[in-house]
Amino acid sequence: MPCLSSRAIILRPPEQAIQAESHIVSSLQFTPYPGPTELSSGCVLPRSSISRVPNELLAEIFRILRAQPSENSSWVRILRVCKHWFAVAATLSDLWTRVSSKQSVQSISRFLSYSKSRPLQVDIYPKEDSSATLFAIGAEIDRMQTLSATFSRCYDFHVAICFIFSRLPSLQDVSMEIIHPYPLANPRIFPLDKCCALQSLRLVNIDAAFESGTLSQLTKLTLENVKGLPSLATLVEILRAAPGLENLELSGGCPIELLFEDATPVTYLPVHLPKLKRMRLRSEPELPRALFTILSTPPDADIMIYLPVVSLHGVSRTLFLEALPPIESLSNIGGLARINSLSLRFHGPTPSLMGFCIDSAGCQPLFALMVVETAYPPTKTPTQEIVHGITSAIEILGLDERVVSLDILGPEEDPSAEKFDVSCLIFALPKLTGLWLRQSGLPSVLSALLDEWMDDDGDCGVVCPDLKEMQWQDMRFDDELVVNVMDCLERRREMGVTLLERLSIVGSRNRGLRDEYVNMLERVARKLSYDE
């Protein structure tokens, strides 16, 4: 039997081996390889181990280095290790398909040569001469499929559009942004109706023009403009031409025709996006209200509406309601029918209302209304007004009989925190089984849970009789808090309500949670968990 070496043999998956080799390669000092060195005895040193790496493994290492999130041509430095490595890379045309305005004309020419006839990705950076890059590409511009461009001025955008205009019908992925779009009167129009092969489009501070045509391959669309979003008619035509849209983001001022109450209403045919998965809308309430009377979404779409507040008087209770479409059009927001969990949170001074579907598959976000504070100096949000406004929204949306869990993270470290009354939310959601809250909302919740309701027939009942789980966050414990909690839960048990299945205390470390408090709380919940 042949003698086996005592040295352990470790077999690793190919991916790990490639990652290990690429790590070794990236740590090398980049010095030109001088070739084999002859000793004085006339012998020739054998080739070093690094020059004996198989070509297939080298190719994978080069592709990993090229994919790193760094300057797109920086990986080329590794080819200075030896002529063999450069020769291998020169045969891999897919390594050379990305050129940028940070490269010299000679470098761009070399990339174009080695990439052969493959499709190109072109990156244009601000403060770089974009026209020089485009002229260096020259006739090879016909190979461009992906364009990512950030311009400092409108003039640079106009030069680029003129140069690539003939290539627009073949572009698949486009991202264009103007950093300084002022003065806003300067036209900066992207002819979207010329781009019939587009799969992804992102325009920032650039107007999208669309009259007719099809965008059947478009799956991702982002329009953001400080000047304002396109007219509602243009938006509707774009969405109608892109039935395969999966990701939609609109951010900017409301179309001006929606801001005039005396404007003649226009009737649009309905638009349905059957494949929509994610939608983000940042604009005044008038836009979502108008858009969702026309646009309908699937029941599993994740929709979030950001409402800017520019008033120095804070947020009015009607802000959320103004962003909702009329009751007869609420069915267009497909996810509303599946919401069974709500979250009311205050991110600093700004509130948000989020709706989720919690089932065996997990927690899926479906719909959200979020306020974005844009006033300066920041205003103090009237939290009680928001609570009443959200209570009205729950009733209008028809969520009162379906929501089983409520997450209330009220303002923290607020002098008026004890006045944060959320009892109306507890009364509005009789089917609650889970409740998550912060200290600012606890007093009003305990008071509401001890109340009773009476129907038209005179029958009485306990508020939220199915409540089984509570979670407290960032509580500061003292005798008064614990006694109030014990009194509430003990009295509910006397009213026929069973013990809590679970009470979780999060963020209680160094906040006064003593062993005696733990022993008392264990008597009102079957399972108690807290930070050690």
Image (tube, grey):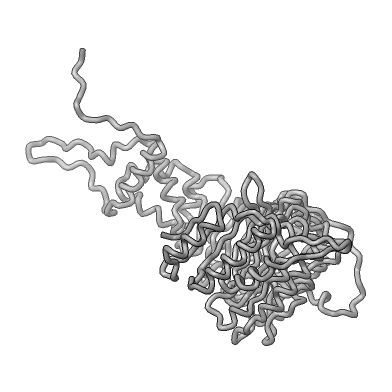
Q: Residue at x 30, y 52 (%)?
A: 27
Q: Nearer the viewer, residue 19 or 71?
A: 19
| Side of 316 where 293 appears, left or right | right
* Percent position of residue 251, x then y: 68, 69
Picture quarter with the N terminus: top left
Q: Residue at x 56, y 56 (%)?
A: 525
| Side of 352 where 55 appears, left or right | left
Q: Quadrant of residue 189?
A: bottom right
Count how many numbered circles sit on residues in the image: 0
Q: Quadrant of residue 225?
A: bottom right
* Percent position of residue 399, x then y: 77, 60
Picture quarter with the C terminus: bottom left
Q: Quadrant of residue 74?
A: bottom left
Q: Residue at x 81, y 78 (%)?
A: 259
Q: Residue at x 82, y 68 (%)?
A: 290
| Side of 31 where 300 appears, left or right | right
| Side of 79 where 9 appears, left or right | left
For this orientation, the residue located farthest to the left is: 41
For this orientation, the residue located farthest to the front is: 494
* Percent position of residue 220, x then y: 67, 55
